[in-house]
Image: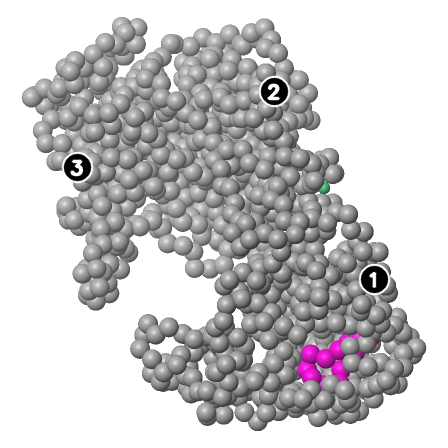
Amino acid sequence: MLNIRCPYCEEDRPEIEFRNAGEAHIARPDEPDRVDDRQWADFLYTRDNPKGWHAERWRHVHGCGRFFNAVRHSVDDRILLTYKAGEPKPDIERMLREREA
Amino acid sequence: MSASYRISGGSALKRERTVRFRFDGRDYVGHQGDTLASALLANGVGLFGRSFKYHRPRGIVSAGAEEPNALVGAFGPTGGFTPNLRATQVELFDGLVAESQNRWPSLDFDVGAINNWLSPLFMAGFYYKTFMGPKAAGGNWVWRQLFEPAIRAAAGLGSPPTEPDPDRYASMFAYCDLLVIGGGAAGLAAAETAANSGAQVILCDEQAEFGGWLLSEAQAEIEGRAARDWAADVVARLRGRDNVQLLTRTQAFGYFPHDFVGLCETIEDAARCRNPALPRERLWQVRAGRVVVATGAIERPLVFVDNDRPGIMLAGAAQTYLQRWGVMPGRRIVLFTACDSAYPTALALAEAGGNVVELIDLRSNVAEALSAPLRARNIAVSVGAAVTGSRGGLRLNSVEIRSVDRNGQTGAMARQLACDTLLMSGGWTPSVHLHSQARGKVAWSEEAKAFLPVARAGGPISAGACAGKFGLRAAIRSGADAALAALGAPPTVDVTPAVAEPALDLTGMVGRVPFAGDPRRGKAFVDFQNDVSARDLLLANQEGMVSIEHVKRFTTTGMATDQGKTSNLNALAIVASNLGKPVPAVGLTTFRMPYTPVSFGSFAGIGRGDQFDPIRRTPIDGWAQAQGAVFEDVGTWKRARYFPKPGEDMHQAVARECRTVRQSVGMLDASTLGKIEVVGPDAAEFLERMYVNSWRKLAPGRCRYGIMLNEAGYVIDDGVIARVAPDRFHVTTTTGGAPRVLHMMEDYLQTEWPDLKVWLTSTTEQWAVIAVQGPKAREVLAPLIEGVDLAPKALSHMAYAEGRICGVKMKLFRVSFTGELGYEVNVPADYGRAVWEAIWEQVEKYGGCAYGTESLHVLRAEKGFIIVGQETDGTVTPDDVGLSWAFGKGKGDFVGKRSLSRTDLAAAGRPQMVGLLTDNPAIVLEEGAQIVAMVNAPIGTEALGHVTSAYYSSNAGRSIALALVADGRNRLGTKLHVPMPGGSVSVTLVEPVFVDPKGERVNG
Ligand SMILES: [Zn+2]
């Protein structure tokens, strides 16, 4: 079971308090009527499935109820960081370099 | 039978306490502290079971969790039966009853042993080819009915229990700074080092007492004392600390992400005899800050022909039985080794009075210091030699020995050596299971002939033998270092206690022992539990399997309940040798949890019977039960399905309820409806974006039927929404849909439109909802209600008002899911039953009834009202089910809108909801049945649609059905067919409304 830090509660809590909500940083088009079928289908269905670090959404559903983002490694489940919804996607490569330095 | 193999000593035994037990119907006596394995060995029982495929007689191989052969079924103190227990881990208690497995009619005489003579049939791939095999065989009746069940029955493990488990199981959650797995030399040192630093420590070990190999050690001394005494001292010190939790009989079976470790603690059966309130097992879920893995090493068997005869055992196991349980393994003992650890074993057995005849060492160069003490005790030492075969029936009686030259070639001459016991040691395999489960990498060490754990920053730290640190001093040192590293403390001066121990090389060999003759003759077992021999691996390679994962599945090596603890490395080395590759090039199969089997009971914990699933009951549930209602499960809710009168079946009860509602009045407990309060200055705007309907212009005091889509354009929920105030909406959802709808609303509100000022609150359980439906509904309610004018003009259809009923605060909706004049009375849940009973008194005056969900479904289907999840299945648009009228005119964007103009959703010919009338009005169609264009359509005919709802309608006087049919609205009036097992049923497509097509009754 993952141990996830809720950036709102600022606490590490067990995964059963959370619910995964899919890939992060997929913005709903501002004006859906102005995107073509292809772009709309991409928004609906096209998702990355990387082997490695990726940003995903979580909701602290049995806690504060807030949605937030986490950068998690898809192989060994390490979580690099969690951050509030609306904050920009972090530069993962840079963070890893800084961590090693 | 006398306890003739029991000698003096045995640190685990309480000699003064004798324990009676029964094995395969025979009574025996052991001592407190015995395992079933040690007690039976002490009683001279060498035969423990029959092997999986060939039914070969098998004895004890090991003394621990890795035991592949001695699987037994046992009855616990409460009478609960558990199959497939390792006899090496079953502790005796007075009255234990155990039995061997996989034999019929008895262990000594087993009919299934004929499989051994039929073994050419059962070679590698047999099961694979037989059960996955050619159609010709699989389709043959005789094969499927007769042979396959017989083969399946003949090969197998113990039978599952037939009675419910009488035992209790507990679930524990724990947190610690450091979890130390394994209480041997390294684990004890790690735990004490961490404890000294003040950290919270949990130390667990699978055995009944801490100490690991220290308990079996015969020669080494620590600080001038026997190794096991040092262990006892450390344990005593740890016990005295309040920052250390000690768990014995506790298997770390699974290592999950983020250092979450599953432990299964078995409560000693003897303790449960004294205190029946104790659970059988406790499942510990430990969240550890850091983890030190100190799980030791497992001795490898040597792979030679007929290496599975009872009497052939691992050398280290024999030393353990001697030291801990005072058991001499046989009368005439030979050892066969590829490493140094068998030498001290031979000495210890001889010193205890054992008749140790000879030690055969595969290696040519052996230090004089090792062999001299043996020779001094008249134990012959033959180096550069191998055991190449064995003889005997139910017990070993001799071994065949040949010389082995430096190139690994065996000599032509063979000699037979009489013995009843052969102790083997192929070397020691570090237990990297948990490290691997933690997704740690391992690397092959040619020097250690083993895969060793590769440390990963932040990951578990392996210490001691499982990290390749053999020898007690090295293990203690590495345990202490691991604890310091785990806690982020700087390394301190070396405080490792003084250890006097012989320097032993435990590397040994991997693969098959040099042999004479045809490699395909004879069975040199690699995996005892799954009966896989070196020949099977060769066959797999010859059949083209080169990946170790393929070989594993083809031969089933390593796939038994022991997960190949004793066999994996030998199998790998044999495959590598067959393929002419180095071992690491073949690769390692995945180590999977659980390390040892874990009972379903401990996973279930208290979650069984009534506790299996939470049950939600409405405030009115007790009344319905008292009335004799029949209930159904709707999600986690219990809902009254119908209220039968004496002598009525469901059909009759539902017919009566439906008639009564349309003729006079009925009441329904609708409390399970999902309810969400949407509040705030932007509440209307928010709903405008979430639902297909318009909300901005809805006046306070009015309701509207709302339809929610997902972003793909499909209907996912519906419900009536009332505008309570300009900035406040009372949203209702489907019974099962409330959490999902709230989650989706929160998602959009928080992440897409965080600028909207809206607050969402679940109020499902705050309100009891009583639907009163039928022509007499107004008369029923009027005398009870204050503050609301029920006159049709004052409170018209789809109006909302607040007032009091029976003096209780009330939200009143004039809504109808039946097509009749109807109200839904919402009162605070605590008053639900009282208000219900007051309304019921009124309803009875008018000859009305209570009705359940079954009548609810029929009544709404008579009107063609959809149920989300019945008429819809996640691929249905509002237009498909005839709800285009609900769209707000001139609305902007809302969830799902863009998708509705995608080509496939806007295309003609989509499935559309229609009504179906069967030619024969008595036939009720089956929900889910397919609809086709022709009578008696052949299999493969494409369906035009399917039946979504079908009932007998007492109000229509016939059967009715709703269906989704391609281009259905253009087919109204035509006939289609519903193929059923008894023949096609002809149906006519009609408008989906069967009662009051003009919708006048709702006005009352
Ligand atoms: Zn939170």
The chain under label 1 reads B
Judged from the image, the secondary structure of the residue bearing numbered disc 3 is helix
Rendered image: mark on residue A50? none
Label 1 environment density (alpha carbons within 10 Å; few <14, some 14–19, many ≥20): many
Judged from the image, the secondary structure of the residue bearing numbered disc 1 is strand
Instruction: Tell how many labels.
Output: 3
* Label 1 close to label 3 by CB (< 8 Å): no
Tell me the kind of residue under disc 1: Arg
In this picture, which residue range is highlighted in magenta?
B812-825
Q: Residue at x 49, y 76 (%)?
A: B967
Give the residue pinned by disc 2: A98
Give the residue pinned by disc 1: B728
State how far apart marks 1 and 3 are (Cα).
Answer: 75 Å
Q: Quadrant where the N terminus of chain B lies? A: top left
Viewer-closest of B502 and B96: B502
* Label 2 close to label 3 by CB (< 8 Å): no
Viewer-closest of B815 and B505: B815
Q: Is residue B500 magenta?
A: no
Q: Residue at x 61, y 41 (%)?
A: A25
On screen, residue A55 versus residue A84, left or right, reads left
Of tags 1 and 3, the one toward the viewer is: 1
On screen, residue B792 versus residue B27, left or right, reads right
Note whether residue B263 is visible: no
| Badge 1 or badge 3: first in the primary sequence | 3
The chain under label 2 reads A
Q: Quadrant of residue B588?
A: top left
